Image (cartoon, helix red, strand yellow):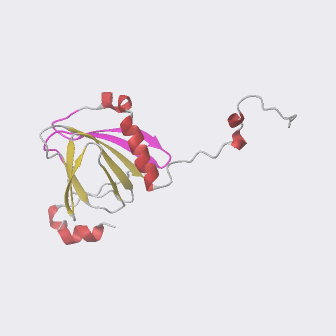
């Protein structure tokens, strides 16, 4: 059967035929996937990495509607201190090296490729306990507006467990 209708050009270029572009990933899996895709594009971030022996180095790599992506480096012995991320959720992805996360549930070693997802109010400390530098990628949604520190007197295991969702 022949049709008199012919399509000229790219039909996907017609705006009303395209699905709306999401403002940002809509699920945890979407943010994890975003972190993986950024991590896989090594050429986009590797040349930016710097190592600072006096303090942790960080660089805001990207912002999107309602989220931020940060690149951090860690020389041996550097750590974040015990903290949470206020109202932000996050995805931590280790790009190079090894980091140790200390939380109310114990300690966890994160090697290159490992990812941790956390909810608002989750208290933890991240440390480079290894003998080589490490690089990590952090996505925060909404963008990071606060990072309250939790000193040792307030970080008993029971207090950490109740703070974690």
Q: Is residue 8 above or below residue 35?
A: above
- Choose top left, top right, bottom left or bottom right for residue 117: bottom left
Residue 125 spot, x, y in % from top left: 22, 55
Q: Is residue 128 above or below residue 133?
A: below
Residue at position x 68%, y 36% from top? 12
Relative side of 143 to 76, left or right: right
Q: Which residue lies furthest to the front in this view?
A: 1
Residue 104 spot, x, y in % from top left: 21, 65
Q: Is residue 61 visible?
A: no
Based on the picture, tell me whether residue 22 belongs to the magenta stretch: no
Q: Is residue 5 above or below residue 111?
A: above
How many marks the image carries: the answer is: 0
Q: What stretch is highlighted in magenta?
A: 51-79
Residue 126 spot, x, y in % from top left: 22, 51
3 vs 162, nearest the viewer: 3
- Choose top left, top right, bottom left or bottom right for residue 60: top left
Residue 67 spot, x, y in % from top left: 44, 48
83 vs 109, nearest the viewer: 109
23 vs 152, nearest the viewer: 23
Based on the picture, tell me whether residue 78 belongs to the magenta stretch: yes
Q: In which quadrant is the C terminus drawn?
A: bottom left
């Amino acid at each position: 059967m022949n049709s008199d209708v012919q399509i000229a050009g790219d039909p996907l270029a017609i705006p009303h035929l395209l699905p709306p572009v999401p403002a940002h990933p809509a699920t945890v899996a979407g943010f994890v996937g975003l972190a993986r895709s950024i991590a896989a594009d090594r050429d986009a971030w590797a040349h930016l990495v710097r190592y600072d022996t006096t303090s942790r180095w960080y660089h805001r790599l990207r912002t999107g509607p309602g989220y931020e992506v940060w690149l951090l480096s860690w020389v041996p012995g550097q750590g974040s201190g015990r903290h949470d991320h206020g109202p932000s959720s996050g995805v931590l992805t280790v790009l190079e090296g090894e980091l140790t996360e200390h939380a109310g549930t114990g300690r966890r070693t994160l090697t290159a490729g490992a990812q941790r997802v956390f909810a608002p109010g989750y208290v933890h400390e991240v440390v480079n306990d290894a003998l080589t530098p490490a690089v990590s990628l952090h996505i925060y949604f909404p963008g990071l507006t606060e990072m309250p520190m939790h000193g040792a007197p307030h970080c008993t295991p029971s207090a950490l467990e109740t703070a974690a969702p």
